[in-house]
Image (spheres, helix red, strand yellow):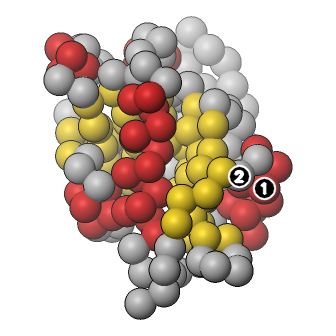
């Protein structure tokens, strides 16, 4: 088994790694912190975290894992999700959220202690009456909301989502 360790990474290192290896998304727009996993000689995965994209979750106590990317080395993603949550707790966050696309198992999230909270229907785009946006690069897909909380964070309300 290859020895793995959590390492600090800069924003630029994390964004470059995500751009190079993430399966279906590019670099995230928001950013609070990033962490990496490395072997003795190379970076094999990164996780980035930022403010929640959903305005209803952006309460100042919730962090969103915006990207988790690895080169395929076993156990890297579960290490990253666990480390991201430990870092969030150390920074005072009470809840972590992230999303997976329909068809992704979530095994790494479950291994790190996250739980699937809701299945969300695909949207028609980013444009809403209250917030006009371009849907030029929007890809519609069903997804799952994953949550991890501290004991105090269990009382934080989750937004209600429309049924699928």
Name the residue nearer the viewer: 139 or 109. Answer: 109
Question: Image quadrant of residue 111?
Answer: bottom left
Instruction: Tell me the crowding category of disc 1: few under 14, some 14 to 19, or many 20 or more residues within 10 angstroms, Cα based.
Output: some
Image location (x, y in percent) of residue 31: 67, 34
The x and y percentages for residue 152 are 21, 16
Does 1 appear above or below 47?
Answer: below
- The answer to whether 32 appears left or right of 15 in the picture is left
Q: Is residue 89 above or below residue 120?
A: above
Q: Is residue 134 left or right of residue 121?
A: right
Name the residue beneath numbered marker 2.
Answer: 9
Quadrant placement of the N terminus: bottom left
**Residue 147, x across and y down, in percent:** 28, 38
Could you tell me which secondary element the residue under label 2 belongs to? loop
Residue 91 x/y as whole percent: 49, 24
Under circle 1, the secondary element is helix
The residue at the point 52 percent across, 66 percent down is 5
Against 110, is 103 above or below?
below
- The residue tagged 1 is 13
In the picture shown, does residue 59 fall above or below 22?
Answer: above
Q: Nearer the viewer, residue 138 or 24?
A: 24
The residue positioned 47% from the left and 37% from the top of the image is 87
Q: Residue at x 24, y 27 (%)?
A: 150
Residue at the extreme bottom: 1
Counting other residues with Cα less than 10 Å from the Cα at mark 2, is it few (<14), some (14-19), or many (20 or more)? some
- Marks 1 and 2: CB-CB under 8 Å? yes
Q: Quadrant of residue 94?
A: top left
Q: In this rendering, which labeled residue sits more in front, label 1 or label 2?
A: 2
Q: Residue at x 63, y 31 (%)?
A: 32
Residue 25 seen in this snapshot = no
**Could you tell whether 12 is left or right of 164 in the image?**
right
Which numbered dot is residue 114?
A: none
**Residue 89 seen from this side:** yes
């Amino acid at each position: 088994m290859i020895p793995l360790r959590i390492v600090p990474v800069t924003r630029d290192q994390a964004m470059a790694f995500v751009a190079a290896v993430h399966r279906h998304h590019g670099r995230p727009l928001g950013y609070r912190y990033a962490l990496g996993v490395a072997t003795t000689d190379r970076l094999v995965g990164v996780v980035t975290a930022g403010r929640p994209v959903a305005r209803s979750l952006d309460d100042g106590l919730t962090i969103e894992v915006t990207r988790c990317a690895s080169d395929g080395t076993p156990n890297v993603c579960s290490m990253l999700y666990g480390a991201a949550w430990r870092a969030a707790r150390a920074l005072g966050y009470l809840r972590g959220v992230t999303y997976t696309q329909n068809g992704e198992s979530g095994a790494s999230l479950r291994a790190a202690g996250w739980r699937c909270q809701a299945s969300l229907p695909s949207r028609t785009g980013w444009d809403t009456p209250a917030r006009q946006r371009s849907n030029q690069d929007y890809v519609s897909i069903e997804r799952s909301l994953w949550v991890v909380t501290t004991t105090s964070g269990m009382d934080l309300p989750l937004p209600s989502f429309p049924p699928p």
